[in-house]
Amino acid sequence: MKHALLSGGLLCCTPLLYAADYTNIVLINLDDVGYGDFSCNGAYGYTTPNIDQLAADGVRFTHFLAGQPISGASRAGMLTGCYPNRIGFAYAPNPNSTFGIHPDEMTMGELVKQKGYQTAIFGKWHLGDAKESLPLQHGFDEYYGLPYSNDMWPFHPQYEFPDLPTIEGNEVVGYNTDQTKFTTDYTTRAVSFIKKNRKKPFFLYLAHSMPHVPLAVSDKFKGKSEQGLFGDVMMEIDWSIGQVMAALEEAGVADNTLIVLTSDNGPWANYGNHAGSTGGLREAKACTFDGGNRVPCIVYWKGHTKPGTICNKLSSNIDLLPTFAEITGAPLPNHKIDGVSLLPLIEGQKDANPRKSFVYYYHKNDLEAVTDGEFKLVFPHKYVTYGAYEPGNDGQPGQLTNAEIRKPELYDLRRDPGERYNVIGQHPDVVQKLMKIADEAREDLGDNLTRKKGTGRREAAKIDVKK
C-alpha cells in the first residue's frame, strides 16, 4: 500500500509554488565512475570542464560513499535513504528479476511529490524491471531509459551491442542495439523536461548508462580524447552536464536549482582501458574497500554553496533523500531510514558533522567493515580482488580471483586512504569504539558473517516472473 501522503486528493490541493518558494533538484548519477575520473580529481588524457566548473562553483565531497559497491543496491539505497540491505536489496536485479523495490518504500520521487513537484528519470533505473517495480509506480511522472545495466544480456562478455529493451513510461518502445545514442537521448529529454517545467518545481533524475561497459560514444566525441574510448565517453558525459547547466540558465531557474553529481560505485577495474580510475583507492567495484564504495560527489546550489569548497566529512548517497527532504520541506517516510541530512555541509556550517559512522554491507547481508570517517575496521571476509592478474583490454575483462581477510584489520584513512597499512595493534580504543558500532548494526540489520538475523530489515517486493 502506498503512503497516504501520496494520494491524488492531497496533491490536487497542493498550492502553486513560485520561484522564491521552492528549490528544483537535479540529481545526476553516473555508472561505474571512479573517484579519479573527473579532471578536477586528477583524470588523465581528457578533461571535464563542465564538471570542473561545477566543482569550482560548489562543494566537492571527498569522503562520499555509495550505500553498496554495486549498481542496483546502491541506487535503491540512494533513492530510499536506506542501507540497501535494510530494504531487501543485494547485488543488482537482473532481467526478469524475482525482486524489486517494495511499494511501501518511499523513493525520492514520492518524497518530493508531497510538495507538488514534477518528477522524471531518464536513463538507468535498476530497481527491478517488472511493471510494478518501474519508476511510474514509484513517484516519477516520466521515465525513458533502460531498466537495468547496459551489459545485461546472455553470453556476457561480448563486444557486440545487445538488444536492450528501451522503456518509455511503462512500455517497451524498442530494442536498442545502438548504445552510441544513449547519452545524447537522455540529455535531450532532460533538457526538454527542464524547459517544460520551468514555471513549476521539478525533480530531475538523470541516470546515465555510461561509462559502464560496453562503452559507446556518439560521433560528436569519437576519437576526441587521448585516453581512447573511455576518455571519449567521459567527454560526452561532461558535454551532457554542460547541456543541463545551460538549459537551467536558459529556463531562468539556475538560481533556485540544487545540482548533485555522483556515481553509483567505483570502476570495473578488470576492464582495463575501458574502466575508470579509483584515484589510488584500494580495489574497485564489488569490493567494500574504498575503491568500490568511495565515489565522487559535487553539489552546487547558488547562494548556498561557497565556491571551491572541499568537504572531507563522512557522507553517503543514502544521505541525499533526507537532504532533499529538509530542502523541500517534504515529510520523511514514517518508517526508519539510515540517511542524515547533508544540508549543514552543503552550506558550509562550521564544525558540522551529521554522519558519525557508516557500515559497509555487501553480498546478501554481510557486514564487512565499519568507519567513523577517520578509521576503518575491516572484518574477516572473502572478496574479489583485482590485483592478482593484469586487466583486460578493449572491452574484454581481465581475470579475477578471490582473496580473504582472516583477522580484523584497522586502517587510518586520514593517513592511508588506500587501506594498505594495518594499524590494529596501535589503536585498541578505536577498535573498541568501532566494534560497538558494528554490534549495534548487527542487532538492527543482521550480519550473515556472524550469523546475526537483525530486527530492522524489510523485504523487497517479490516478483512473479511467470506472469
Image (cartoon, grey):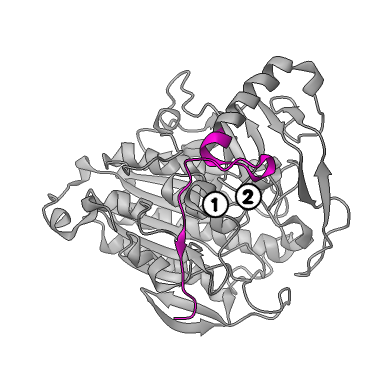
Question: 10 Å neighbourhood of mark 2: few (<14), some, or many (≥20)?
Answer: many
The N terminus sits in image quarter: bottom left
User: What percent of the width, then of the height, locates residue 44?
Assistant: 72, 50
Could you tell me if the residues under marks 1 and 2 are in contact, i.e. CB atoms within 8 Å? yes
Decide whether residue 464 is among the magenta residues.
Answer: yes
Residue 65 picture quarter: top right
Residue 418 picture quarter: top right
Task: Report if residue 436 is visible in the image.
Answer: yes
Residue at the image position 58 percent from the left and 27 percent from the top: 437
Q: Amino acid at mark 2?
A: Pro
Residues at marks 1 and 2, CA–CA distance in whole angstroms:
7 Å
Q: Amino acid at mark 1?
A: Ser
Residue named by callout 1: 74
User: What percent of the width, then of the height, locates residue 240?
Assistant: 49, 60
Residue named by callout 2: 69
Q: Which residues are magenta?
A: 441-467
